[in-house]
Amino acid sequence: MSGRRGAGAQVPGAGDAGRAAAGVTGELLDRRAAVAELGAELRALADLVTRTEAGADVLRECARRLREVAPALRERIRGSAEPASPSGPDPAGSRSCGHPCPRFRPPRESSSA
């Protein structure tokens, strides 16, 4: 045997077909939906920003209004070393968020001292 553990040993709830994934609550599902909604609106806004021909006064007013909204998102921020809450579908019950491209491997930091 290779020593590699099966998916059921790595992911809580993965080996239990027909049961809800571990750690998935109504609150988590609601947060995921809210994250998806906010993301969709931000993508639409980014598209408008790149295509608009609005005047400088309108653009500055929009920027001012966005600065008013940002503090609400800063109220609860995780540390850079803390794993993100899952925001997308989570069929395996995984509580970690990886890079959306499964082949992406971030460069390892060199440990030369």
Image (cartoon, rainbow, N blue to C red):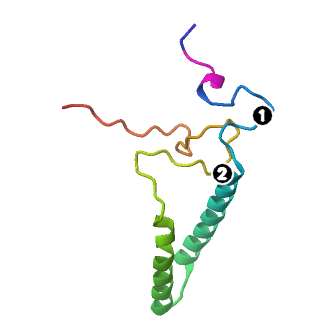
Residue at image position (52%, 75%) is 50
Residue at image position (52%, 44%) is 99
Asked which quadrant contains residue 46, the reply is: bottom right
Q: Quadrant of the N terminus?
A: top right
Q: Quadrant of the C terminus?
A: top left
What mark, if any, has residue 19 been given in the picture? 1
Residue at image position (45%, 86%) is 60
* Residue count near mark 1 (Cα–Cα under 10 Å), binned few <14, some 14–19, many ≥20: few
- Magenta stretch bounds: 4-9
Measuring from the top left, give residue 109's x and y in whole percent: 31, 37
Badge 2 is on which residue? 28
What SS does tag 1 mark? loop
Viewer-proximal residue, 79 or 90?
Answer: 79
In the picture, measured across the screen, residue 111 lies left or right of residue 49, that is left
Q: Residue furthest right?
A: 18
Residue type beneath disc 1: Arg
Measuring from the top left, give residue 97's x and y in whole percent: 55, 44
Viewer-proximal residue, 17 or 110?
Answer: 17
Answer with mark 1 or mark 2, whichever residue precedes in sequence.
Answer: 1
In the picture, measured across the screen, residue 112 lies left or right of residue 53, that is left
Asked which quadrant contains residue 16, the reply is: top right
Q: Are marks 1 and 2 in contact (CB under 8 Å)?
A: no
| Image vertical order of residue 24 relative to residue 56, above or below | above
Separation of marks 1 and 2 at Cα, in angstroms:
17 Å
Residue at image position (59%, 67%) is 43
Measuring from the top left, give residue 47's x and y in whole percent: 58, 72
